[in-house]
Image (cartoon, rainbow, N blue to C red):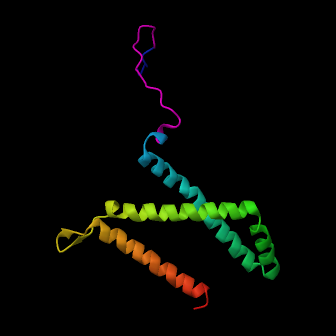
């Protein structure tokens, strides 16, 4: 039968070092990792905010005006500012991670990491410029 061994006073206990709740504060790379993971919460908020905006626009002028009044709340404005910072942080860390996550070869040689990250940043700048041009009435 599958009988589990029973614990006795003479059974050795394994040594387990106590881990602090704030273990991740000891190294800058760990802090950056935790902040990047935390950024997903603010990215989710950004998506929810855009979905609420879309719903308000679909409800007509009155729904849109109610949404604008709600979004002027200092808490919502603060949350959106923090979200913008975290979305930017998330994008920058992702673009810097891309050369490690994907290996691109050209003519049998590995493409330099700077080219991969640089192309991501260039595409980001181009799309941002295009969106700004469209929004500002280009």
In the rendered image, the residue lying farthest to the bottom is 138
Q: Nearer the viewer, residue 77 or 3?
A: 77
Residue 85: image quadrant is bottom right
23 magenta-colored: yes
Residue 40: image quadrant is bottom right
Q: Nearer the viewer, residue 92 or 13?
A: 92
Rendering coords of residue 53 (x, y %): 70, 73
Q: Which residue does the image show at 77% across and 77% down from the upper left?
A: 64
In the rendered image, the residue lying farthest to the top is 10
Numbered-mark total: 0
Q: Quadrant of the N terminus?
A: top left
Q: Which residue does the image show at 55% across and 53% down from the upper left?
A: 38
Q: Please tell me whether the stretch drawn in magenta is mainly helix, strand or loop.
A: loop
Which region of the structure is painted magenta? Answer: 7-24
Residue 58 falls left or right of residue 3? right
In this rendering, is residue 70 above or below 26? below
Q: Which residue does the image show at 45% across and 8% down from the upper left?
A: 9
In the rendered image, the residue lying farthest to the right is 62
Q: Nearer the viewer, residue 106 or 22?
A: 22
Rendering coords of residue 129 (x, y %): 50, 82
Q: Which residue does the image show at 39% across and 72% down from the upper left?
A: 120
Q: Quadrant of the C terminus?
A: bottom right
43 magenta-colored: no
In this rendering, is residue 113 above or below 2? below
Rendering coords of residue 114 (x, y %): 31, 68
Rendering coords of residue 89 (x, y %): 50, 61
Residue 38 falls left or right of residue 60? left
């Amino acid at each position: 039968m599958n009988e589990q061994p029973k614990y006795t006073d003479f059974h050795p206990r394994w040594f387990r070092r106590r881990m602090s709740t704030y273990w991740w504060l000891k190294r800058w790379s760990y802090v950056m990792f935790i902040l990047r993971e935390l950024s997903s919460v603010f990215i989710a908020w950004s998506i929810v905010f855009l979905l609420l905006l879309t719903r308000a626009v679909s409800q007509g002028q009155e729904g849109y005006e109610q949404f604008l009044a709600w979004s002027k709340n200092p808490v919502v404005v603060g949350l959106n500012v923090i979200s913008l910072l975290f979305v930017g942080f998330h994008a920058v860390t992702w673009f810097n991670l891309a050369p490690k996550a994907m290996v691109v070869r050209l003519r049998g040689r590995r493409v330099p990491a700077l080219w991969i990250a640089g192309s991501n940043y260039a595409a980001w700048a181009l799309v941002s410029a295009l969106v700004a041009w469209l929004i500002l009435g280009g």
